[in-house]
Amino acid sequence: MDGASTLGVVSVLPPLIAIVLAFWTRDTILSLAIACLVGILLAGEGLLGFPNLMMKALGNEDFSWIFLLEIFIGILIAFFQRTGAIQSFADVIGRKNYSRKRIGITSWFMGLFVFFSDYFSPVFVGSTMRKVTDKVRISREKLAYICDSTSAPVSVIVPITGWAVFISGLLIGLGPIQNETDALAVFTRAIPFNFYAVLSVLFVGLIVSGIIKDFGPMKKAEERAITKGKLIRDHSTPLISKELTNIDPYFKDRLLSIVWNFFLPVLLIITIAVGTYIGLGSAKTMEAFLAAVIFLGILMRFQGIPVKDIMDTAMNGIKGIMPAIMILVFAYTINTLSEQMGTANYLIQVTESWLNPGLLPAITFLLAALIAFSTGTSWGTFGIMIPIAVPIAIGFAGGDINTIVLATVAAVAGGGVFGDHCSPLSDTTILASTGAAVDHIDHVRTQIPYSLILGGIGTLIYLILGLLG
């Protein structure tokens, strides 16, 4: 690794400042903005470097895609609220008088069902289950945890998702992995070794079923919700504004068909996303949401809702999603800054000399987790770590694909998911807070103890595998 490609220990400071300030001030947007400004000054770019950095970070296809996706998600949630679809769904579930445990398990299963998109899953589960979980006094922090733990951790252990395609693509050409078929086979064989992701999904089920009791900050949040009826912490700032949470159904005396206004748009999203994945090899999630917005907008007009009301509802949806978009703006900015300063390269430099066959999977997992948590990007972590760690593992294996190689592939995937799962800079973590309408840092703070424990267990298993292998 060329030392000129990193600013050394200085490169770690911006993401570190962002994370520390976010927990201290509980203001994620301000913390990210300060971290970006400090990073620009440390890089010697001066104050004028700040707008230049933002233009580079935001003026690209990746950000445009997630920006449009967020906009369409906000509009669709607003349409669901205005048509009474979410209220109808909540009433259908509510009439069953399900217990807190049953509602929690239902939310968990819904997250598992929407396995094809880590972006759609947390917003869908959060927005549709929020009224139901509120009714049985499940804290918003708990709902966000359920949403988050059934998004990226699920997507990375299913071999027919964009995650599988991306990781498999990075494996092609490494050692004996010669083509797409070989790469996908290696990815699939590595799934049982992705201990963090598998444990995360299972752990949620154990928590919501009551087999494992809540502990730490999550326990306090649940006690607050149960005993005081406070679903969010006093003085917290939910990552979704009142324009989106306070939308009343247009027809207050009757709720329109839940089939037309809820299940058909959701089915349309799933059909387009899965269909395009099968037919084109890439799930067109953003286009699926756009189609659902247009479809439901037309249905609203046919049902007698005026055009002006439909447009006002759409604008409220956009306004309501803006807090999440602002965090994404600065998250992308600081990620670009970290790339320019060589944060990931520095972390690799200070650890690659430790690598040996016995420690390789565990060190790979920890390093991938650290990079992903610091930068908020799992796919970026995959792109950095797979070309480095996997060839080393194949070399140790004498050119074969053995347990150490599979464990190393899984360690990169699991470590990347750790960051995507619980970093305050991660887009899916932001989306989970948005879907659950909870303070973003409250979500991260209550989830991290669970994630750290599972990450520790995964590291221990990798150490045992390395020593036995």
Image (cartoon, helix red, strand yellow):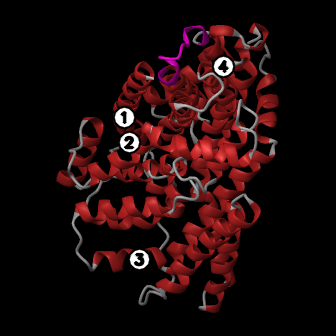
The image quadrant where one finds the C terminus is top left
Q: Quadrant of residue 334?
A: top right
What's the magenta region? 352-362
Measured Cα–Cα span from mark 1 to mark 3: 34 Å
Residue at horizontal 34%, vertical 78%? 91
Measured Cα–Cα span from mark 1 to mark 2: 7 Å
Front: mark 3 or 2: 2
Q: Quadrant of residue 2?
A: top right
SS class, disc 2: helix
Measured Cα–Cα span from mark 1 to mark 4: 25 Å
Asked if 238 appears above or below 48 in the picture, the reply is below
Measured Cα–Cα span from mark 3 to mark 4: 46 Å
The dot on residue 343 is 4
Q: Residues within 10 Å of mark 3 (few under 14, many from 20)?
A: some
Dot 1 or dot 2, earlier in sequence? 2
Which residue in the protein does label 1 denote? 454
The dot on residue 199 is 2
Task: Indicate the position of residue 131 as horizontal and vertical percent values.
Answer: 37, 66
Q: Tell which of 6 and 29 is nearer to you.
A: 6
Task: Indicate the position of residue 304 as horizontal and vertical percent values.
Answer: 60, 91
Which residue in the protein does label 3 denote? 89
- What residue type is disc 1 on? Leu
Badge 3 vs badge 4, beta-carbon distance below 8 Å:
no
Measured Cα–Cα span from mark 3 to mark 2: 30 Å
Is residue 357 within the magenta segment?
yes
Q: Tell which of 349 and 158 is nearer to you.
A: 158
Q: Tell which of 41 and 436 is nearer to you.
A: 436
Describe residue 282's horizontal placement relative to residue 156 as left or right. Answer: right
Q: Residues within 10 Å of mark 1 (few under 14, many from 20)?
A: many
